[in-house]
Amino acid sequence: MRVAREIISFSQQEMQSRNFNVLKEIGVKVGKLSCIDPESLRFAFDMLKKETELSGTELKIETVSIEAVCRSCGREFIIDEFVFICPGCGSYEVEVRKGEELIITHLTFE
Amino acid sequence: MAERVQVEEKVLSENDKLAAQIRKDLGARKILALNLVSSPGSGKTSLLEKTLSLLKDEFRIGLIAGDVQTENDAIRLERAGGKIVRPIITGGACHLDARMLGKALEKIDTDSLDLLFIENVGNLVCPSGFDLGEDMKVVLISTTEGDDKPLKYPAMFRKSSALVINKIDLLGLSDFDIDKAEKNARQINGSLHIMRISCRTGDNLNLWCDWLREQVSRKKNA
C-alpha cells in the first residue's frame, strides 16, 4: 500500500513537472527479494489510482529473479527457492547481484 | 503521441535518503543502532527488558518502541529501567520508516548514548524494505512459532545480521525443531550469528550480552 502510494505520488510529480496531462503507463521492476508481491502491489495501485488523475494509468510490473554469485568459486546462478547456497561448491558465501530492486523504470505519457 | 521517459527511480528513495542521514548522524556519535524485528509476540519487548536489567549500568541505552497503537511497550521499557525511551505510534502502518525514526530521535539527547535499540512493529514482511539507518537488523523468532519462519520470510532473514531464537525453555512443548530452524535460517543467510535464549528463565542471555558488548566496542573503535 505504502509502495503503491509512493509510486503514484512520484508519478504525479513527474507528470506535473514535465507538463503532461495523461500518463499511460508506469513501468516498475520488482525483485523477488524485495518482499513486494506483484499482485498485491497491482491491487493497491488500482485501488488508489481511482481517485486521482492516474485512473487510466496501467502499471507494468516486471519481476526480477534473484541472481547471485558465489564468493568462493565465482559461479553465477539464479536462486528460485530461496536457497542461498552455491550449487557448485556448497559455499554459503553468496552475494546477491539482482533481485532486491524496487524501481520505477519508466513513465509513458501521452 | 506517446512519450516514454526513463526514470530509474527507487520507489523508496526518500526513505533511503533519510535513513542515510540518520546513519551518518549516529555514526558520527559512534552509537550502535540495532533494528529489532520479529513477528508479534516473539519477545522483542521482553528481550529489551532483560537487556536493560543486565546492561543498563554498563551502557547508556536508548530505546525507540514502535507500535501500531498504544504506548504499552514503551511503558514496559521505562518500568524495566529504561531512562531514554520514546514511543512511535505508527497509526496503522505495519512498519517504522526513517521519517518516523528521525522525528523520534529529535526528542532524544543522542550525545549521551552508546547503544540504540529500535523495536520495530511486529511484522516480518514490510520492515525489511525500510532502511532506518541502523547498523544491523536483529531478527527474533520463538519456539512457539513455526521452524520454517526463515523460509517464509527470506528477505528479512537475508537482511539481518543476527538471529535470536527465544523461548528455548519451551522446547519440546511444541513441534518446533530448533536445529531445523537454524538450518533454514543458514540456507537463507550463511553469515547470520545465531543465539538460542530464553527471556523468561534468563538462559543464555550472557551470549546475547557478550555479542552486544562486542558490537558496541567494535562501533566505538570503528
Image (cartoon, grey):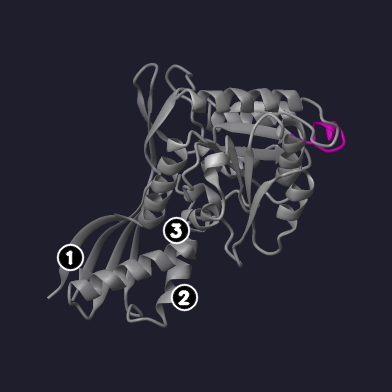
Give residue A71's quadrant in the image: top left
Magenta part of the chain? B166-175
Q: Of the residues shown, which amino acid type is indicated by label 2?
A: Met
Residue beneath label 3, please? Answer: A38
Residue beneath label 1, please? Answer: B4
Q: Does B192 appear above or below B106?
A: above
Q: Does B219 appear above or below B91?
A: above
Q: Nearer the viewer, residue A52 or B107?
A: B107
Q: Nearer the viewer, residue A62 or A26?
A: A26
Please give the name of the residue rendered at 47% of the width and 64% of the height, measured from the top-left corner: A2
Q: What main secondary structure does the magenta stretch of the protein show?
A: loop
Quadrant where the C terminus of chain A sits is: bottom left
Q: Position of residue B72 (x, y in %)?
A: 75, 58
Please give the name of the residue rendered at 25% of the width and 69% of the height, measured from the top-left corner: A14
Residue beneath label 2, please? Answer: A47
Badge 2 sits on which subunit? A
Please give the name of the residue rendered at 71% of the width and 60% of the height, measured from the top-left corner: B71
